[in-house]
């Protein structure tokens, strides 16, 4: 069995198998480097209650209470937890993350194989001594381009560790696109392949109902493709029936809630998705109001620059080819390269148009539509390869320079998710003047008359802050307009780790909201036991070996309201209902009290 798996993986991946192995090891190593987000245990509860219902231990009301967002995957994860049932919650969280990371690796591998099937998306370069070696290496390199675009995008690297909604939906969409790509290439086995693809798409849609629009686009694309090859109307109608049947089958079978609620349950789910009950708004360009440009702006300021450049190049060159009717893109069997890229264009432009016209409720950056990264990187890879081929035909040296610049950008993104990216700049200020409590320094403005020691530390947490990564354009935007940053409050995990390093005894900690408690669960047992959490500020001065410690980070709603009202792109923090600082960007404020002395450290994230 091991020999067979080794043959399948190494035989089909070639020399680049080591990339997948090293990337996998690094991902598993960093599973506990990201904090527990506000929805992580909520997702776990979905699987727990669905399993308990199916085993007859709870009534249906528990399933109805937790009916949204991927019950199949969450149930599988909860079943896997039973192998470590008596372990602390930290181990169960890490197991869930390991399962998600493994699925993400499998999705990257399938994306690579899809590229191989399409002859490296048309990439051709003279590498190797013999013609066969050259062709094979060209296919390998071309197939890796979209894989690198996904794997080394910092936000995707982070989301693949913990986001069992949007990252999971992305993985499932990779498998769906992979199956559809097979349909473009082999229409003889169309009915069987279509049924499998739409069943998987139905299962994926239990996480995000965006899969329904993907189904419509896929069926419309198949309709047009098969009309060109002369299929009759009855046979086309049969394909639609098979697609709808497979989608409904996958959706209903993987949704226990619908087994009992039927049409009424489906109506409730659709109403929930269409009219998302999110009352807090989304901080976007200094405003909490919905915007038709929300998705486009977030994409433009968070995607890697080489992805954006390649994407725009592909769009421009494609339009020029279409106008001149001289599309010389390399074709593989059945024209699959063009079909897959064209379908990706359908998906991306359809969702952009939908967001511009309908202004749906979106928040937390663009994680709800994170699966669009897949068609984007396919279009970007095609654009990069097309531009490289044009440059090579004009001037070999220019093409090589272009490839070298791209490689340097890839290396930069590898650096971003590596431990080498942690940069610290510490400023310590002693005995601030009481009469002028506002202290000006290069990092921030801070005021607190009680403090006798203030430490301002600017840190680039590297992969630990990858979930709030912006490209250089986005970093300039943040200087002018506030945007959502740590919307799931995962940075509290770094705050707790810092506080624990300050003392070896018990720590009495006061905070607001559930984020501190959630992130406490990810700490090692010996550290978690030392933390005594209180939500009521009346407990601030409990004594514990003479030391009281407090980590403060305001909850998302109030912070966003304050930022929007002042429109200065700042985050506000309070102690005892008194504002103590207002800082641009994403920050943590950690306060340590030693009897009458207060040490306050501000962590400023370098984005």
Image: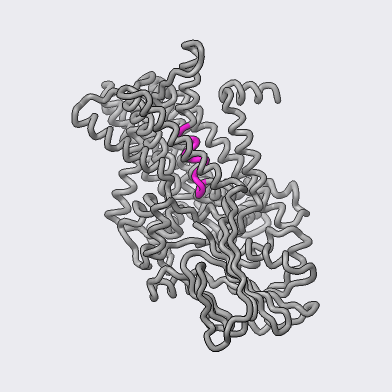
Can you say whether 559 is above or below 407 in the image? below
Q: How is the image coloured?
A: one colour
For residue 242, side relative to residue 153 (left or right): left
Task: From the image, give the main secondary structure of the stretch colored magenta.
Answer: helix
Q: Which residues are magenta?
A: 145-156
Looking at the image, which residue is at 57% across and 27% down?
16
Image quadrant where residue 326 sits: top left
Looking at the image, which residue is at 38% across and 61% down?
275
Image quadrant where residue 562 sits: bottom left
For the residue pair 406 and 566, the one nearer the viewer reads as 406
Can you say whether 410 is above or below 286 in the image? above
Looking at the image, which residue is at 36% across and 67% down?
287
In x, y percent, where is residue 387?
A: 34, 30
For residue 484, side relative to residue 31 (left or right): left
Looking at the image, which residue is at 47% across and 65% down?
585
For the residue pair 457 and 514, the one nearer the viewer reads as 457
């Amino acid at each position: 069995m091991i020999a067979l798996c080794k043959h399948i993986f190494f035989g089909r991946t070639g020399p680049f198998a080591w990339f997948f192995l090293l990337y996998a090891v690094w991902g598993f190593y960093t599973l506990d480097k990201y904090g527990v987000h506000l929805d992580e245990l909520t997702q776990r509860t979905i699987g727990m209650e669905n399993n308990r219902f199916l085993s007859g231990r709870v009534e249906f009301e528990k399933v109805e209470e937790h009916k949204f967002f991927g019950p199949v995957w969450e149930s599988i994860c909860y079943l896997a937890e039973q192998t470590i049932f008596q372990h602390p919650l930290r181990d169960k969280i890490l197991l869930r993350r390991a399962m998600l990371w493994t699925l993400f690796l499998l999705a990257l591998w399938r994306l690579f194989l899809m590229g191989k099937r399409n002859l490296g998306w048309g990439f051709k370069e003279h590498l190797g001594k013999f013609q066969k070696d050259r062709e094979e290496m060209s296919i390998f390199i071309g197939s890796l381009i979209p894989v690198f675009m996904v794997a080394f995008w910092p936000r995707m690297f982070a989301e693949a560790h913990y986001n069992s909604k949007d990252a999971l939906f992305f993985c499932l969409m990779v498998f769906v696109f992979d199956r559809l790509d097979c349909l473009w290439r082999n229409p003889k086995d169309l009915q069987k392949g279509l049924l499998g693809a739409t069943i998987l798409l139905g299962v994926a849609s239990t996480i995000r109902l965006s899969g329904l629009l993907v189904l419509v686009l896929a069926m419309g694309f198949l309709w047009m493709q098969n009309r060109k090859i002369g299929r009759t109307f009855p046979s086309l109608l049969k394909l639609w029936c098979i697609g709808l049947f497979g989608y409904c089958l996958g959706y209903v079978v993987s949704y226990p809630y619908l087994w009992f609620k039927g049409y009424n349950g489906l109506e409730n789910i659709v109403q929930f998705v269409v009219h998302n009950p999110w009352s807090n708004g989304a901080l976007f360009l200094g405003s909490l109001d919905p915007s038709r440009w929300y998705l486009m702006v977030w994409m433009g300021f968070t995607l890697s620059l080489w992805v954006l450049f390649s994407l725009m190049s592909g769009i421009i060159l494609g339009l020029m080819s279409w106008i001149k009717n001289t599309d010389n893109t390399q074709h593989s069997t059945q024209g699959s390269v063009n079909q897959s890229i064209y379908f990706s264009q359908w998906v991306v432009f359809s969702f952009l148009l939908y967001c511009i016209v309908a202004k749906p409720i979106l928040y937390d950056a663009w994680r709800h539509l994170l699966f669009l990264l897949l068609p984007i990187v396919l279009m970007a890879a095609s654009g990069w390869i097309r531009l490289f081929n044009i440059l090579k035909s004009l001037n070999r040296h220019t093409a090589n320079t272009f490839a070298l610049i791209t490689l340097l950008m890839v290396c930069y993104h590898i650096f971003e998710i590596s431990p080498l990216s942690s940069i610290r700049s510490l400023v310590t200020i002693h005995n601030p003047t009481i009469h002028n409590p506002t202290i000006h320094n290069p990092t921030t403005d801070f005021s607190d008359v009680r403090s006798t020691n203030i430490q301002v530390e600017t840190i680039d947490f590297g992969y630990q802050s990858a979930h709030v990564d912006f490209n250089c354009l986005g970093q300039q935007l943040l200087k002018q307009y506030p945007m959502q940053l740590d919307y799931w409050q995962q940075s509290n995990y770094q705050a707790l780790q810092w506080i624990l390093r300050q003392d070896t005894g018990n720590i009495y900690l006061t905070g607001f909201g559930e984020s501190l408690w959630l992130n406490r669960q990810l700490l090692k047992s010996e550290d978690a036991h030392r933390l005594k959490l209180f939500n009521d500020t009346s407990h601030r001065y409990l004594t514990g070996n003479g030391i009281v410690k407090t980590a403060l980070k305001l909850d998302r709603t109030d912070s966003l309201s304050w930022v929007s009202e002042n429109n200065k792109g700042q985050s506000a923090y309070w102690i005892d209902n008194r504002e103590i600082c207002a800082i641009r960007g994403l920050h943590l404020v950690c306060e340590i009290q030693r009897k009458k002395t207060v040490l306050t450290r501000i962590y400023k994230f370098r984005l």
